[in-house]
Image (cartoon, rainbow, N blue to C red):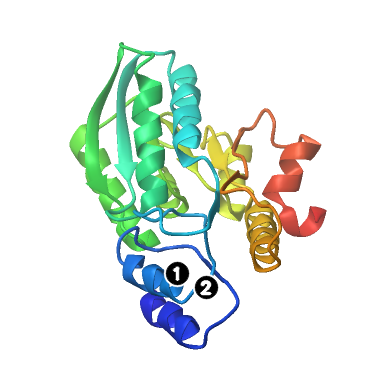
């Protein structure tokens, strides 16, 4: 579907295209087609396995994953067994988060990953099922990392149903009302949160600059914040967690 939409815009010869790829490889031919027709392309949120675009506006997902590793390590006392639940193959943003998480864990030789090859899939129901299977297989790990919103929600619910919420430390990625409540109730011990308002704003700003032949940055890092029960009420964190209320 995303390929068809992008190809439609290319055929209409729009002035610029801003796109968040659902797959880091599938959109490459369509982006190449746009560039062949001299249509500027701004990639945002999730990357492309190519450099044939004009600008990239996104969270530093690798750094976000690394910060999640530091948070989880702190929560489990820098030792123990943990699970990393991946999202899906071809998702450039979550692949980088997972790589960053593994990099961060290198600082803690007493932490062992007992499962790191399972994928949650794109739906809550699938993520919860995979999470339940992991909990049934591995019992009581000390901590768990999930690399996106769906996997974090699925694992949180699985922990609740198993009566293990709060006992097993859980760190994830992204935010919504359910995850905010999890943080408030101290059964979710941290999430890496992006700044979607800045991603959208900087993407449009960059497209405008390119169209009008003004200076622009090839890579724009829109930041990442680890949200916890300790900093949830901080005004700066609130502005990111509740962008509609603060922008």
Residue 32: x %, y % from top left: 38, 68
Q: Position of residue 21 (x, y in %)?
A: 42, 63
Q: Relative to 31, is 166 above or below?
A: above
The answer to whether residue 137 is left or right of residue 167 is left
Q: Is the residue marked by circle 2 packed among few (<14), some (14-19), or many (20+) residues within 10 Å?
A: many
* 9 to 190, vertically: above or below: below
Q: Position of residue 157 (x, y in %)?
A: 42, 49
Residue 192 shown left or right of residue 246 in the figure: left
User: What residue sits right under mark 1 in the picture?
Assistant: 35
Which residue is the site of mark 2?
39
Q: Which residue is at a point 43% across and 45% down the rendered structure image?
A: 156
Marks 2 & 1, CB-CB < 8 Å contact: yes
Rendered residue at 31%/11% (across/down): 110
Q: Quadrant of residue 80?
A: top left
Quadrant where the N terminus lies? bottom left
In the displayed image of the protein, which residue is found farthest to the left? 137
Up/down of 217 relative to 123, above or below: above
Between 150 and 155, the one nearer to me in the picture = 150
**Which secondary structure lies at badge 2?**
loop
């Amino acid at each position: 579907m995303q390929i068809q939409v992008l190809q439609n815009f290319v055929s209409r010869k729009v002035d610029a295209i801003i796109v968040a790829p659902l797959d880091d490889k599938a959109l490459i031919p369509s982006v190449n087609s746009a560039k062949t027709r001299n249509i500027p392309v701004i990639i945002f949120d999730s990357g492309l396995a190519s450099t044939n675009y004009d600008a990239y506006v996104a969270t530093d997902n690798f750094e976000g994953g690394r910060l999640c590793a530091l948070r989880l390590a702190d929560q489990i006392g820098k030792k123990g067994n943990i699970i990393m639940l991946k999202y899906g193959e071809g998702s450039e943003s979550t692949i980088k988060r997972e790589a960053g998480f593994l990099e961060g864990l290198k600082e803690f030789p007493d932490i062992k990953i007992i499962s790191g090859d399972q994928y949650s899939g794109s739906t809550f129901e699938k993520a919860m099922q995979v999470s339940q299977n992991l909990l049934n297989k591995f019992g009581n790990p000390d901590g768990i990392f999930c690399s996106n919103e769906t996997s974090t929600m699925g694992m949180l619910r699985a922990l609740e149903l198993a009566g293990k919420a709060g006992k097993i430390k859980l760190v994830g990625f992204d935010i919504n009302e359910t995850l905010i409540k999890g943080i408030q109730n101290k059964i979710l011990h941290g999430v890496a949160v992006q700044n979607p308002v800045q991603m959208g704003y900087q993407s449009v700003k960059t497209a405008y600059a390119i169209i009008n032949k003004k200076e622009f940055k090839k890579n724009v890092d829109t930041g990442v914040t680890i949200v916890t029960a300790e900093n949830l009420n901080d005004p700066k964190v609130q502005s990111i967690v509740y962008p509609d209320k603060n922008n």
